[in-house]
Image (spheres, rainbow, N blue to C red):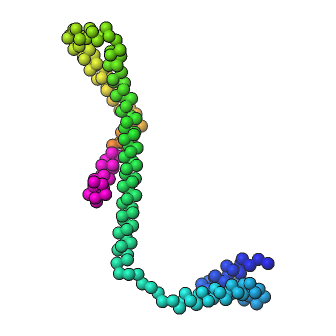
Amino acid sequence: MSHQPYSDWMHLALDGELEPEQRSQLEAHLQVCARCAALWRVLEEVEAMLTAAPLVSARPGFTNRFNARLRQQRSQLRAWLGVFVLGFSVVGAALILLPLILGMLWPFVQLLGRPATLTTLFDNASAISQTLLTVGAALWASAWALGAFAVGTPLFWLLIVTVLSATVLWIFTLRRLALRGVLL
């Protein structure tokens, strides 16, 4: 015999939400089933105790303390989120800038690997100035090419805006944490 619908109906009956037809079926079942009748008596006793118990009111200021604690927890969550976003922003900026910096420094590394070139550079001042002009022109050409690429690539602009936004968010979060005394 399945007792499940009768158990559910007992709870509905205590809440006053049981249909009259189901109520009559429950009462008929309670007459023949000792297990369900015992459960019904226990549920009625518990319901009577809960109904008779006085309501306890919250201490004064409970709502304010609860809301303050909730705000504190949310601000801590936002602070950690800011730290997380800033960390990813720094890593993203490093991933963008590191190849560019290494690419610009590579000609200098190649010059240092050639002793004859270094001797010529140090012996001849005009060669040094010519090399500096060549490196400057190469840097200018690299910057110009990167700029031309960036202007035509929306994904690059999205990346730049994302990195800048994350940096601003990070600075804002750190400032708020410092003002609240969380960071010192």
Give left or right: position of 10 versus 88.
Answer: right
Q: Is residue 167 magenta?
A: yes
Q: Which residues make up the magenta segment?
A: 165-184
Q: Nearer the viewer, residue 127 or 8?
A: 127
Give left or right: position of 88 versus 36.
Answer: left
**Residue at the spot 71% in from the left edge and 78% down from the top edge:** 5
Q: Does the magenta stretch include residue 20?
A: no
Q: In this view, does 158 lie above or below 115?
A: below
- Give the quadrant of residue 143: top left
- Give the quadrant of residue 101: top left
**Residue at the spot 37% in from the left edge and 31% down from the top edge:** 98
- Give the quadrant of residue 153: top left
Q: Nearer the viewer, residue 164 or 48?
A: 48
**Residue at the spot 32% in from the left edge and 19% down from the top edge:** 108
Give left or right: position of 2 versus 110.
Answer: right
Question: Does the image show residue 148?
Answer: no
| Spot occupied by residue 93 in the image (x, y as percentages of width and height) | 37, 38
**Residue at the spot 39% in from the left edge and 54% down from the top edge:** 80
| Spot occupied by residue 32 in the image (x, y as percentages of width and height) | 78, 88
| Spot occupied by residue 131 in the image (x, y as percentages of width and height) | 26, 14
Question: Does the image show residue 183?
Answer: yes
The quadrant of the picture occupied by the C terminus is bottom left
| Spot occupied by residue 63 in the image (x, y as percentages of width and height) | 37, 75
The quadrant of the picture occupied by the N terminus is bottom right
SS majority, magenta: helix
Give left or right: position of 181 versus 23.
Answer: left
Q: Nearer the viewer, residue 146 or 15?
A: 15
Q: In this view, does 173 lie above or below 144?
A: below
